[in-house]
Amino acid sequence: MELMGQSSIAGGTGVCLPPARPVRWSLARKVSLALVSILFSTLLVTAFFAYYKFESVYSAQVQSRYSFVVFTIKKRVEDSLNLGFALRQLRQVQEIIEREKSRDAQILAVEVYDYRGEVLFDTDRGAIGTRVSEPLAEAIRSGMQQSFSVVDEDNLIVGLPLVNNLGKVEGGVVLRYPIAYVEKGVSGLLSQLLKSIAIALLAASAVAVIGLYALFGGVGRKLGSMEKAMGDVLSVGGLAVPDAGGDSFEERFAEFVGKTRETIDHVKDATDEVGRLDRLM
């Protein structure tokens, strides 16, 4: 888009319009910024849900693993109960729970308590004779014969009731492990997610920017040329002439610029006439 001559309607004086503001961002840059922002937001939301989904699954897997340990202890204790022994009399239980604790450093304690909530056997022998918390006691008093879990300060607890062959709940066995163990496993995923997001964002952004510049580079230059031509016509006069080989849009744009210039000149002439008549009155 080129500028030819000065408008004869302007009378050589032109219209005092502010100069056109330079374009700081090209079309390709603006679209690239918008696309990169959308990509970043999408990856961030995806990572957010993936993190909490993994946290849930990981916590469930850890709990399932320790529930199996508790189940193993439960079956061995119940086998002895079915022989007619009272829970308090099963002295081998202390050896069983200590052996299971020694196999996993993450196990903080294993406890066996009776129906009243009194601790009969504990890997921490100093706790024998004490009473478990009310949520643990209530878990077996309710008659529930399924696994249960409780959060106790910084520890997670999984447990199972001990049931004799008559279906009577005799007590419960619980295993404690630290919340930090789960948090440590999940935090490793967070760093990996952040690295993956950064790599994916950089790769996608590079591809997007290159593609957008290839697609919109010519359009941006054409729009810049049209904007410059319009600014020149409106500020100093003249005619906007489409480049050789220009399409019909450029021709219509040139006509629009010309008509806009004529309108401005007519408005200026009308304003001057109104001012002249106002002075005569």
Image (cartoon, rainbow, N blue to C red):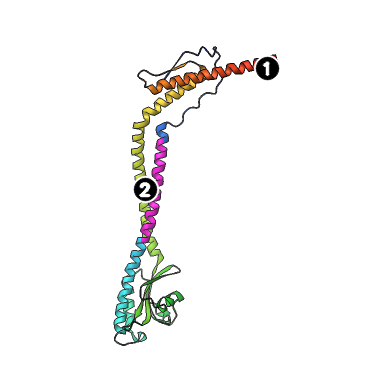
Considering depth in this image, is 59 or 252 the residue closer to the camera?
252
- The residue drawn where x is 33% and y is 38% is 207
Quadrant where the N terminus is found in the figure: top left
Q: Main secondary structure of the magenta part?
A: helix
Q: Quadrant of residue 104?
A: bottom left
Is 223 situated above or below 244? below
- Tell me residue 31's x, y (percent): 40, 36
- The residue drawn where x is 42% and y is 38% is 33
* Residue at the spot of label 2: 197
* Residue at the spot of label 1: 278
64 to the left or right of 224:
left
Q: Quadrant of residue 76?
A: bottom left
Three-letter code, disc 1: Asp
Could you classify mark 1 by the number of other residues whose Cα lies within 10 Å: few (under 14), some (14-19), or many (20 or more)? few
Considering depth in this image, is 196 or 267 the residue closer to the camera?
267
Q: Element type at marker 2?
A: helix
Image disc number at residue 62: none
Could you classify mark 2 by the number of other residues whose Cα lies within 10 Å: few (under 14), some (14-19), or many (20 or more)? some
Tell me where the magenta segment starts and ends, as one range.
31-56
